[in-house]
Image (tube, rainbow, N blue to C red):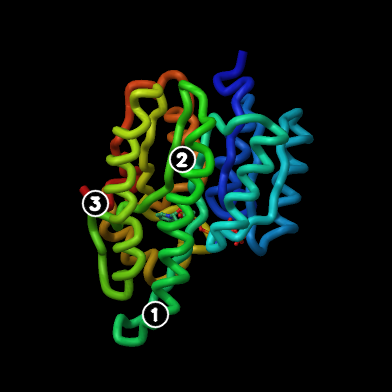
Amino acid sequence: MKRLENKTAFITGGGRGMGVAISKRLAAEGARVILTYSRSQEQATAVVAAIQADGGYARAVQADSGDPAALTAAIAGTIAKEGPVDILVNNAGIYIGRAFEEHTLDDYEQLMGVNVRAVYVAALAVAKQMPAGGRIITIGSNMAENALGPQSTLYTMSKAALTGFNRGLARDLGGRDITVNLVQPGPINTDMNPSDTELADFLRSRMALSEYGTGDDIAGLVAFLASEEGRFITGTAITIDGGLNA
Ligand SMILES: NC(=O)c1ccc[n+]([C@@H]2O[C@H](COP(=O)([O-])OP(=O)(O)OC[C@H]3O[C@@H](n4cnc5c(N)ncnc54)[C@H](OP(=O)(O)O)[C@@H]3O)[C@@H](O)[C@H]2O)c1
């Protein structure tokens, strides 16, 4: 028996970046995986095909996390088709990096809409029907605790907001045997943070392990938290950053 057999997992942003590794890993552990994308339809379809080729269950749904109605509808559709969501992984996120003086209100709405509001919206959409043993896992960032440099105010604020949400929701849902946790990655080689830039060299120079992590590093931790072995961990943030914040 695989660790996540008979579980339904809903993963936002599963077509690209670390969402790919998370989707494949949860499917390999036996979960039925429903992954969302906003723009990367081709990549999301390829992830679904790869999971199916390995004998797993996967389905991709177009749902812009910045659109609460679309995200809510995608979750309602999942509950109708695959049953209540056992594992919610809030992975989709965006970064808008520029001098603070050049930020606009629209930047705020856009970034907070995807990085924070969508996390709230998705949790709300799954919460009522989530069974005992349920898991809500959100991908935050080590930057919630260390802004690391300029041009990150908005992003850092959004990821720090998740820590409060995480603690509160753990207490709201703990009585129903549902755990709520935050995974805070450091530098992971994806489109958002490629490992071959000047910024990457700077980050490596500040890390204890001096090398970027991979989506699989994050997926392993998510799978552990989602499994029965993670049952006593809740309301906490686990930083997985190669020692960048050490
Ligand atoms: N890479 C890092 O070093 C790092 C470090 C700490 C935390 N993180 C966090 O890890 C998570 C994943 O990041 P990543 O590095 O994998 O980034 P990425 O390579 O840029 O991928 C972002 C993912 O989010 C999805 N997404 C973005 N906007 C969306 C929207 N409006 N609706 C639905 N999906 C949306 C994308 O799908 P579409 O292409 O379909 O929009 C894509 O699947 C994010 O929350 C990020 O903040 C990343």
Q: Position of 109 compared to 210: left or right?
A: right
Residue toward you, 180 or 44:
180
Q: Secondary structure at mark 3?
A: loop
CB of mark 2 within 8 Å of CB of mark 3? no
The location of residue 243, given as percent across then percent down, is 27, 47
Q: Position of 208 compared to 13: left or right?
A: left
Furthest-front residue in this view: 128
Residue on which the image places disc 3: 245
Q: Which residue occupies 37% across, 31% down?
A: 173
Q: Secondary structure at mark 1?
A: helix
Tell me if the residue at label 2 has its CB under 8 Å from ligand 1.
no
Q: How many marks?
A: 3
Q: Nearer the viewer, mark 1 or mark 3?
A: 1
Q: Would you place residue 2 above or below residue 85 in this image?
A: above
Q: Would you place residue 230 above or below residue 147 in this image?
A: above
Q: Which residue occupies 50% across, 34% down?
A: 128
The location of residue 225, given as percent across then percent down, is 42, 30
Kind of residue indicated by mark 1: Leu
Which dot marks residue 5?
none
Residue on which the image places disc 1: 105
Q: Which residue occupies 45% across, 19% down?
A: 228
The location of residue 229, given as percent across then percent down, is 42, 19
Tell me how far mark 1 sits from mark 2, CA to CA.
35 Å
Kind of residue indicated by mark 3: Asn
Residue toward you, 77 or 144:
77
Q: Would you place residue 26 above or below residue 155 in this image?
A: above
Residue on which the image places disc 2: 217
How many other residues sit within 10 Å of disc 3, few (<14), some (14-19) or many (≥20)? some
Q: Which residue occupies 60% across, 25% down?
A: 7
